[in-house]
Amino acid sequence: MSKFAKKKDSGLPAVNTASLPDIVFMLLFFFMTVTVMKDNTLKVENTLPNASETKKLEKKDRVIYIYVGEPTSQYTSKFGKEARIQLNDKFSSPSDVGGYILEERAKKSQDLQNVLTIALKVDKNANMGLISDIKQELRKVNALKVNYTTYDGDAFNNLQ
Amino acid sequence: MARRGAPAEVNAGSMADIAFLLLIFFLVTTTIETDAGLDRMLPPIEPPTEKPPIIKEKNIFTVNINRNGQLLVEEEITDIRKLREKAMAFLDNGGAPSGSPDYCSYCKGKRLGDSSDSPAKAIISLKNDRETKYSTYITVQNELVGAYNDLRNREAQRLYGRDFTTMEADYLDPETDSNVKDDLKEKVKRIQELFPQKLSEAETDTSN
């Protein structure tokens, strides 16, 4: 039990893992800050149509989303099978669209207010009548840049 | 060597495990996705006093979609798969005689007298029923945008040796270098001027 007797040199010394938690925490914080939790739950069916000539929707901060589709099964008893518009978290009528756009636009910073895009996420079984109503409302509030959000794919698959 | 009196040290060995667990949770839930779709500009509401400009019939390419998803193109029932071809033939026609101010030197169409004068004059008018399915509408939009893109790609290949669509994607990509962007801006603009996208959408028919 002398102080100097036990110097067994058993190969490589173990790698010091004391800083491992720090590294992992760093990664953790990165992902925590980057993660955007889905801010609205979909209450409508939303199978988008396919299109091939798409453009990417860059810069999420300048996009306002409008969802259209028939209510999901849990809401059909209340709202029926007709396609509806979903703004934020509630079902709305076409006349609400204008107000919603103005409201959302006012929330954005000044320099973004003129470059906003309206992303229309419309179920492929919706009728054009509703879409035309929305477009009319958008024109009234001068929100002219729209993006019909689609999946990438062959457009002729839509026809089946 | 248990010390007495001093508070016991918390074992931090499992800290890494806990952090890993959280990390994996956030890794899995994160979706860094970008949506894609067809970009369109809606026409502004024009003041009612303004007279609509007079456009020659031959410069308008009408596309009607009925409630069953059938297409009436230039008063003819057309299969949707032929739409792109027809639209391209119309846009690329360049019917104006050489010497006239509208003459289109880069057009490769048939130069028919009863089709469009030049790409700058050509207008595609899209009309749909209220009962038309959205998916059909998107397909038609896709084909019409595709017709423009095909023609623009052709010109971009001729002038700059690369596709217009990739040029535009690079131009819109926020990660592209600003020098490259400035260069692309001019080229993209030039091509867009050769084949300006004039796609007019009439308000839907309320009468059936």
Image (spheres, coloured by chain):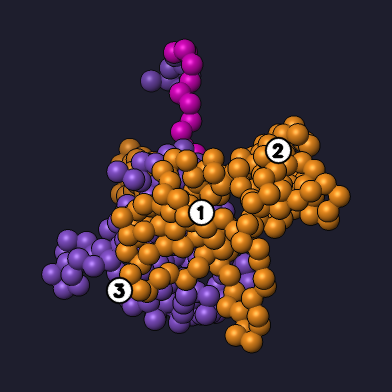
Is residue A84 shown above or below A149? below
Q: Which residue range is magenta in the image?
A: A9-19
In the figure, residue B180 lies in which quadrant? top right
Q: Secondary structure at mark 3?
A: strand
Residue A130 is left or right of residue A101, and the answer is left
Q: Which amino acid lies under the numbered mark 3 shown in the image of this protein?
A: Phe
Residue denoted by label 1: B74
What is the chain identity of the residue bearing mark 2? Answer: B
Q: Which amino acid lies under the numbered mark 2 shown in the image of this protein?
A: Lys
* Chain A painted colour: purple
Residue denoted by label 3: A91
Residue A66, horizontal then vertical, whole percent: 41, 66
Packing grade of label 2 (10 A; few <14, some 14-19, many >=20) is few
- Viewer-proximal residue among A146 and A125: A125
Q: Are marks 2 and 3 in contact (CB under 8 Å)?
A: no
* Sequence-first disc among 1 and 2: 1
- Viewer-proximal residue among A72 and A60: A72
Q: Residue at x 77, y 41 (%)?
A: B106
- The chain displayed orange equals B
Whether callout 2 and callout 3 share a subunit is answered: no
**Mark 3 and mark 1: span between their CA atoms?**
39 Å
- Judge whether residue B189 can be spotted in this image: no
Residue denoted by label 2: B108
Q: Furthest-right residue in view?
A: B99
